[in-house]
Image: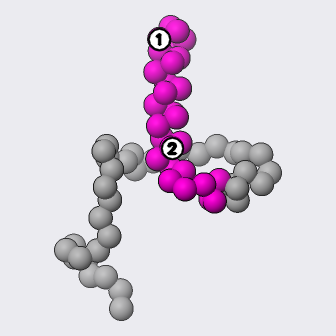
Amino acid sequence: MPFRKNNKIGAKKFLSKPLDAQPICFKGYQGQKEQLKTVPNWQERVRAFIDELIQESTQNGKV
């Protein structure tokens, strides 16, 4: 049975920040996609790494 719209029981996201509607996409090396899917909590870890990468580049005056 499919969920009805605006249901109160469905899955809820427990994120500290809201997600952007547009995804960040890039091409990885062959085999990385399958290996990445085996890493626990990989999406949150990638988001944290991107934040660190942005902060590092702004501190160095590159942005």
- Can you say whether 6 is above or below 35 in the image? below
Give the residue at the far right of this rendering. Answer: 30
Near-viewer residue (2 or 45): 45
In the rendered structure, the answer to whether residue 11 lies left or right of residue 37 reads: left
Q: Earlier in the sequence, mark 1 or mark 2?
A: 2
Near-viewer residue (52 or 22): 52
Residue 2 among those drawn in magenta: no
> Where, by quadrant of the figure, is residue 34 drawn?
bottom right
Q: Which residue, given by chain and number where applicable, does mark 1 sit on? A: 59
| Residue 1 image point, x, y percent | 36, 91
In the rendered structure, the answer to whether residue 52 lies left or right of residue 19 reads: right
- The residue drawn where x is 33% and y is 50% is 15
- The residue drawn where x is 52% and y is 9% is 60
| Labels 1 & 2 near each other (Cβ < 8 A) | no
Q: How many neighbours does mark 1 have within 10 angstroms: few (below 14), some (14-19), or many (20 or more)?
A: few
Q: How many marks?
A: 2
Q: How many neighbours does mark 2 have within 10 angstroms: few (below 14), some (14-19), or many (20 or more)?
A: few
Give the residue at the far top of this rendering. Answer: 61
Q: Nearer the viewer, mark 1 or mark 2?
A: 2
Q: Disc 2 marks which amino acid?
A: Arg
| Residue 41 image point, x, y percent | 50, 53
Give the residue at the far front of this rendering. Answer: 40
Alpha carbon separation for disc pair 1 and 2: 21 Å
Mark number for residue 45? 2
In the rendered structure, the answer to whether residue 39 lies left or right of residue 49 reads: right
Query: Which structural element holds mark 2?
Result: helix
Q: Disc 1 marks which amino acid?
A: Gln
> Where, by quadrant of the figure, is residue 2 drawn?
bottom left
Boundaries of the magenta span: 36-63
Query: Which structural element holds mark 1?
Result: helix
Secondary structure mostly taken by the magenta-highlighted segment of the chain: helix
